[in-house]
Each structure stands twice: as C-alpha cells, then as structure tokens.
Amino acid sequence: MNETVESPHSTIDPTARRRVLLVCILASLAGLMCGMDIGVISGVLRPFGQQFHATTVELEWVVGGMLVGATIGALTGSKITSCLGRKFTLTVAAAAFSIGAIGCATSQSVAMMIVCRLIVGFGMGLSDFATPLYLSEVSRTEQRGAMGSLYQLLKTMGIFLAFFSNSWFAPSGAWRSMMTVEAIPAVIFLLIFLFLPQSPRWLMIQGRKEEALETMTRLRDGPAQAHKELAAISEQLKTKEEGWKLFKTNGNYRRSVGLGMLLQIMQQFAGINIIMYYAPRILEAAHFGLSAQMWCTALIGLVNVLMTFVAVGYSDKWGRKPILYAGYGIMAASMAILAFLLSIGTTTLPQQLLALAMIIIFVGGFAMSAGPLMWVICAEIQPAEGRNLGISISTGTNMLSNLLIGTTFLSVMEAIGSANTFWLFAILNAVGVVLLYLFVPETKDVPLDVIEKDLMSGVKLRDLGHRKD
C-alpha cells in the first residue's frame, strides 16, 4: 500500500481511473455546448442577414454579442465558482445555454438575436472558466494533460456537429432550425451536470472535509492516496484565497497572471475563430460555391475533432511545449501559403483545393496544440491562493481577444483584402513560436504544488517545475 501512495504511477486502480474519466467526460460536455454555439453562427449569418437586411457591422455583432457575454461570464466566474462550487457553476452555464439558444431560435430582430447570443456567451464564459479548473482538481497528476484536453476535444466535436447541421439546413436557409439543434443538448446537459461530484478542493475550502474525503476516495486508489492528496490540498489552503490582495502585493503571482493572459492572447490571435465564425466567407473568397462552402466547413470541423486527439493522447507523453512548437509552426506556414494563394487568385480547381488544404492544415495544427493545451497550462500555472482569480483573468483575456478578432475580421478583410489579412495571421503565429521559447514552461508530470513553489520563489517562467539549482 505504501508503494501505491508514494508512487502513483506504479499502481493504479483501473476502476478509479475509469471513474475519473467518466466524471471528466461529463464535465467536458460543457465544451460540446460551447462548440455548438461557436460553430452554428457560420451557417446562420448569411440567411439571417438576408432576412433582416443586416449590415456587415450588425453581423459582426451577432458574432460579438456572444463574446461580450462570454467576457462577462469569464470575469465573474471566479466569484460565482467560489460561492456555488465548480459543479453548480456548470449547471448555471447550462441554463444560460438553454435560455439563450431558445431565444436565438425564436429571434424576431437583429437586436433580439444579439441579446440572446449574449446570454449564450455568458454560459460559455462560465464554462471556459469553471471546466478547466474542475478538471485540473479532479484529475490525477499523470492524467492532467489528457483530462484537461477533453474540454477542448468536446468543444471541437460541438463545432463539427454545428457545421454538419448547418450543411444539412443550408439549402433551405433554415437558420431557426440550425439554432434549435443547439438548444436540445443544452437542456439535456443541464440535468446531467446535477449528478457530477463536487470538486474535492472546493469541498475542503468550504470546510466539508468528510465529503471531500468520500469524493476523493472514489476518484483515487483508495483511502490512503485520498488522505495523502487531501493533506497536500489542506496544506496549500492554509493561506486563504485572496487573489486581488495577492495580485497587489506579490510580483511572482502577477507573473503567473501575466503568463496566463499571454497564453490566451496567443491562442486567439492564431486566428482559429476567424475560421470557426467565417469559414463560408473565407471559402467564398477562394471562389467556392454555396453548397461547397458549407460541406467544406463541415470537413474542417471534422479535422478539428480528429486532431484534438493528438493533444489528448500525447500531451502527457511528449510534453506540452513540443506539441505547441509543432502546432504554431504548422499554423504559420499554412497561413502564409493561403495568403499567397489568395494574392494570386484561386480561379482553378487545383488552386481552390490547395487553399482548402491550407485551411484544414491550419485547423489541424491549432486543434492538436494551442486549442486544448493553452487551457491546460493556464489552469496549471496559477498558485492555490490566487487560482480562481488567475484563471478568471486569463479566461476573460481569451474572450476579449476573441471579441476583438470576431467583431473586426469582416471589416479588416474588406479594408486590406483577404490575402493581406492572412499574411498578418501568418506573422502572428511565427511570433507565437518565439514567445513559446521565451516564456512558457513545460508542465508535463510536474505536480501543481511544485509549480507553485517554483513560481513563488522567483524561478523563471520557462523553468517552472524544472528549476536549475
């Protein structure tokens, strides 16, 4: 028994491991809802805009309304999660998804659509804050990368399902049907989330130690390992979580908050959501017809799902940074080639297919790297005393960056042209490679308390968990 406690890698209870996997999958269904909300709008914009005679700016804000709500949800997520716990925060998020999706499907004006998208976005912001936090707290150390990546995997599945649904309804322009499809699972997930266990860490914060032990025992290799992990959590929680106070007084904590913000800016400025929101418009610029635009968008969504399995399966084997280096290199190269193709014109079938291939390769590069792994690292680098605030700020940064990209892309493309727009994203991804080298640590197999000790002792960000004594 002592060997199991001291070396969790050597003896693992298969039943407990499966139980952790099930809990993480159920929690990650929040990502499926987020993905459907992200993906559905690409098919809705054209028929909705035609019905209500929406301008380019209004359509950008149909996209942006969700992102405003997501920013609000992310920035209030810390307080809500501290009060309600991770489990019930996800339940509130599912309720927002349900109400907002039903409202979108029944919208009678552009303004109503924007407001309902804002409600949906609030649920997304809460989910993006609470789910990675929950997953990092219920997962084993050796599973943390894979379990943390599940959220992004389910998000990509949601995007694909929305893209596929859009393709089915596109010929008739039935945008209300597209919106209805996302409302159905939201109501189902609202009920599912009620059966999730509370986070053992949150139960310890609330002083509910017996419940925490009972929950942790079901998720680990019996009482001995559960006691060991709860003792470590108890030690970390001796200092009350006071994120804002810590932010004002501790420069090392500000470093982790700043790194979390940088990671999320890097993720959004890679350009993934211009594909997710506006793929049909981009394919139109490459001279694809309407039907081809929608089915190619569904293909892009499928690649997004499949390549996310790379992060889920290998981030705990290969490490976070090698996968991120590969992903950003792929994204920079594919954006550059796409920009070149658009600059010379894609008037022949081979040119069109090559442009589509570059979009698919770009999405694959993102899905295997920055998509899931930025969320994983952001949850890993924050110290216990300021974890909620740190994750809330980084998630809010993600949403604000997403908002900036989502509400300006069409206008920028109209102003400087599609080719120059994609040259810009190629450069941003190349810069991402440099930033990875300079600032991002390798957190594979490093316990959270070790990362925290290194951070608070002033170890360079890139060396967290691997201090050079």
Image (cartoon, rainbow, N blue to C red):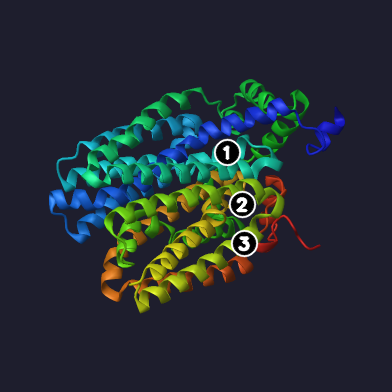
- Of tags 3 and 2, which is closer to the observer? 3
**Image point 55% across, 51% down: which residue?**
307
Residue 225 rendering spot, x and y as whole percentages: 76, 30
Are dots 3 and 1 in contact, CB under 8 Å?
no
Q: Secondary structure at mark 1?
A: helix
Q: Is residue 72 above or below residue 98?
A: below
**Image point 28% across, 35% down: which residue?**
180
Residue 433 rendering spot, x and y as whole percentages: 58, 69
Quadrant into which the C terminus falls: bottom right
Q: Secondary structure at mark 3?
A: loop
Residue type, numbered disc 3: Val
| Distance between the alpha carbons at the discs numbered 3 and 2 | 10 Å
| Distance between the alpha carbons at the discs numbered 3 and 1 | 21 Å
Task: Please tell me which of labels 2 and 1 falls first in the chain.
Answer: 1
- Of tags 2 and 1, which is closer to the observer? 1
| Distance between the alpha carbons at the discs numbered 2 and 1 | 14 Å
Give the residue at mark 3.
440
Residue 29 rendering spot, x and y as whole percentages: 48, 35
Label 2 CA crowd tier, 10 Å (few <14, some 14–19, many 20+): many
Q: Outermost residue toward the bottom?
A: 344
Give the residue at mark 1.
135
Are dots 3 and 2 in contact, CB under 8 Å?
no
Q: Would you say residue 259 is visible in this rendering?
A: yes
Residue type, numbered disc 1: Leu
Residue 51 - label: none
Looking at the image, which is closer to me, 294 or 4?
294
Label 3 CA crowd tier, 10 Å (few <14, some 14–19, many 20+): many
Task: Please tell me which of labels 3 and 1 falls first in the chain.
Answer: 1
Residue type, numbered disc 2: Ile
Give the residue at mark 2.
381
Are dots 2 and 1 in contact, CB under 8 Å?
no
Looking at the image, which is closer to me, 278 or 11?
278
